[in-house]
Amino acid sequence: MARSAAGGTGAGGTRVKAARRPEIRLPALEPFPGGELEPDGDYDGLEFRDADFAGQDGSGSRFLDCALTECALDEAGLRHASVLDSTLTSVRGVGTNLAEATLRDVELIDARLGGTQMHAAVLERVLIRGGKIDYLNLRMARLRDVVFEGCVLVEPDFGGARLERVEFVDCALTGADLHAATLKDVDLRGAASLEISRGLDRLAGAVISTTQLLDLAPVLAAQWGIRVED
């Protein structure tokens, strides 16, 4: 069950609806008995610890009330997977395929991921806290009630994605691509650094701070063909 939070006030007194964070209450978990992931597998109430799923195919699998801790996900195939009411802590991997997956009521803590494919995925009530994610592909994804907190996002691709009630808190956001994205109640004010490579025109529906506006001013001026001279 997710918790409601009060929103902040943006420019002109407009209230920004805050993201609802997940509240994960895991039951007593059984240790994963081992073996490889299976396509369309059903994993319920399991603890995966130090498991190596590199290169395995778990496409279409469902993880419910699970905890994955310090697992390797390099090139793991999890397309169309569902991760529900679960925690992922200190997972690592390059090229993990979560395209068209569903993450609902999930906490992703201190992850070290690179080139993760999440295009057309659905994220709802998801907290991504700590860690570093390079080249995250969220093209055409739907994010609702998602919080990025204290993490580093290097060149994330939100092209064509829909973001609603998404917050960036104390995180570094560099080289973000917002091309053709749709934003509603997206709060960027808490981002420790904010760098947008494409899609500045898609910031309607987001709120930024005065300092961030000044930082983005040179890019905005260049995009609009404005010459700035003293």
Image (tube, rainbow, N blue to C red):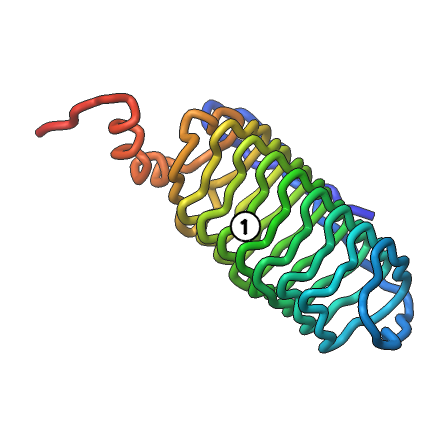
| Res. 43 image quadrant | bottom right
Q: Secondary structure at mark 1?
A: loop
Horizontally, residue 83 falls left or right of residue 5, namely: right
Residue visible at 66% across and 38% down in the picture: 120
Task: Please name the residue that numbered disc 1 is placed on.
Answer: 136
Residue visible at 86% across and 53% down in the picture: 40
Residue visible at 35% across and 34% down in the picture: 213
Check the image and name the residue furthest to the left: 230
Horizontally, residue 101 falls left or right of residue 209, namely: right
Q: Position of residue 170 (x, y in %)?
A: 49, 54
Q: Amino acid at mark 1?
A: Leu
Of residues 225 and 169, the one nearer the viewer is 225
Is disc 1 surrounded by few (<14), some (14 to 19) or many (20+) residues within 10 Å? Answer: many
Horizontally, residue 85 falls left or right of residue 192, namely: right
| Res. 53 image quadrant | bottom right
Horizontally, residue 147 falls left or right of residue 124, namely: left
Above or below, comparing residue 226 to residue 48 in the picture: above
Quadrant assignment for the C terminus = top left
Residue visible at 90% across and 58% down in the picture: 42
Q: Position of residue 220 (x, y in %)?
A: 31, 29
Of residues 39 and 90, the one nearer the viewer is 39
Q: Position of residue 187 (x, y in %)?
A: 53, 38
Above or below, comparing residue 178 to residue 39 in the picture: above
Q: Position of residue 22 (x, y in %)?
A: 74, 50
Q: How many marks?
A: 1
